């Protein structure tokens, strides 16, 4: 499966933000968007699941369905959301030369369904790559935070938890470890930031890494 590096038509920039629940992804995404826009880039912010109309419906099922969902069905729902989102929204934006700043992508599936649900991470990655026709991000920012601190942060901002957030602490510990393993395996794609530090410090680290792209 080829990554975007082999596609000569690409002019845009695909940045994904990853991390456990409560690690501050949305805060950093807003700051990155502002900074890139100040530098004259057209930025589209999007997310998975739920970056398209059909994706909003899939998101509702996968995050808020009241009964159980089999782990493989869950993986396929995320993959279905991804397939539609990448084909109809992300690729066209990249082809227009825009910056796509995306909250969660295939690394979320490998971490949550692969490690969290204990499915085969290689199969999950391949499923996602199939769904997304091989598209890999140019840069993935991983906000790393221990699951206890992340949970405490979530507790202050949530009145209810979605199906994944409601999982126990060992699930979230597996998710974190999987993310760190992914970053270690692809250091050229990942920027790992310590998300326990102040917002401004984290943002400064991210800007330094983004500088060569803008
Ligand atoms: P997110 O949009 O980050 O939640 P919120 O808006 O509440 O901050 O993500 C929703 C949940 O979906 C999150 O717990 C992680 C999970 N998820 C997966 O399990 N697999 C995936 O492939 C994706 C994209 C998300």
Image: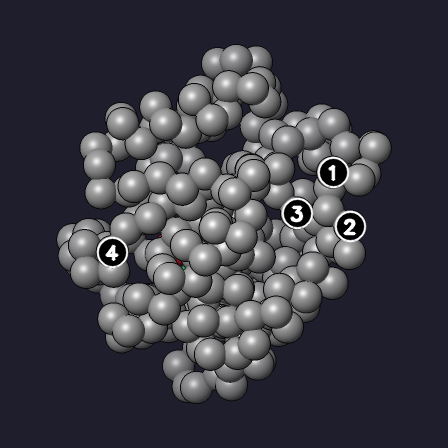
Query: At 33% across and 48% down in the image, what residue appears?
Result: 144
Residue 136 circle label: 3
Residue 146 circle label: 4
Tell whether label 2 touches label 1 (CB within 8 Å): yes
Query: At 45% across and 38% down in the image, what residue appears?
Result: 191
- Left or right? Give the position of 191 relative to 173: right
Q: Quadrant of the C terminus?
A: top right
Mark 2 residue element: loop
Label 1, on which residue?
A: 5
Residue 105 lies, in percent from the top left, at 55, 53
The mark that comes first in sequence, 2 or 3, is 2
The mark that comes first in sequence, 4 or 2, is 2
Picture layout, residue 6 above or below residue 48: above
The mark that comes first in sequence, 4 or 1, is 1
Mark 3 residue element: loop
- Left or right? Give the position of 96 relative to 141: right
Query: At 36% across and 27% down in the image, what residue appears?
Result: 205
Residue neighbourhood size for the residue with mark 2, other residues' Cα within 10 Å, grouped as few (<14), some (14–19), many (≥20) = few
**Along the line of sight, the residue nearer the viewer: 173 or 151:** 173
Picture layout, residue 197 above or below residue 125: above
* Label 4 – label 1 distance at C-alpha: 32 Å
Picture layout, residue 212 above or below residue 55: above
* Label 1 – label 3 distance at C-alpha: 8 Å
* Label 2 – label 3 distance at C-alpha: 8 Å
Residue 2 circle label: 2
* Label 1 – label 2 distance at C-alpha: 8 Å
* Label 4 – label 2 distance at C-alpha: 33 Å
Residue 202 lies, in percent from the top left, at 31, 32
């Amino acid at each position: 499966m080829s990554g975007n590096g082999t596609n000569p038509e690409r002019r845009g920039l695909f940045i994904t933000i990853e991390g456990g629940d409560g690690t501050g992804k949305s805060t950093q995404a807003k700051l990155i968007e502002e900074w890139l826009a100040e530098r004259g880039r057209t930025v589209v912010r999007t997310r998975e699941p739920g970056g398209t109309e059909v994706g909003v419906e899939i998101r509702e099922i996968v995050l808020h369905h009241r009964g159980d969902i089999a782990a493989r069905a869950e993986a396929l729902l995320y993959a279905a959301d991804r397939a539609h989102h990448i084909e109809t929204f992300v690729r066209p934006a990249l082809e227009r030369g825009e910056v796509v700043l995306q909250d969660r992508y295939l690394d979320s599936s490998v971490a949550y369904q692969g490690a969290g649900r204990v499915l085969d991470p290689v199969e999950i990655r391949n499923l996602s790559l199939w769904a997304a026709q091989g598209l890999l991000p140019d840069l993935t920012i991983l906000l790393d935070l221990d699951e206890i601190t992340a949970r405490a942060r979530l507790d202050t901002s949530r009145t209810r938890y979605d199906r994944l957030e409601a999982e126990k602490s060992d699930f979230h510990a597996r998710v974190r470890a999987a993310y760190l393993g992914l970053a270690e395996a692809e250091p050229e794609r990942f920027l790992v930031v310590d998300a326990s530090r102040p917002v401004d410090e984290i943002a400064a680290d991210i800007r330094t890494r983004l500088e060569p792209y803008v």
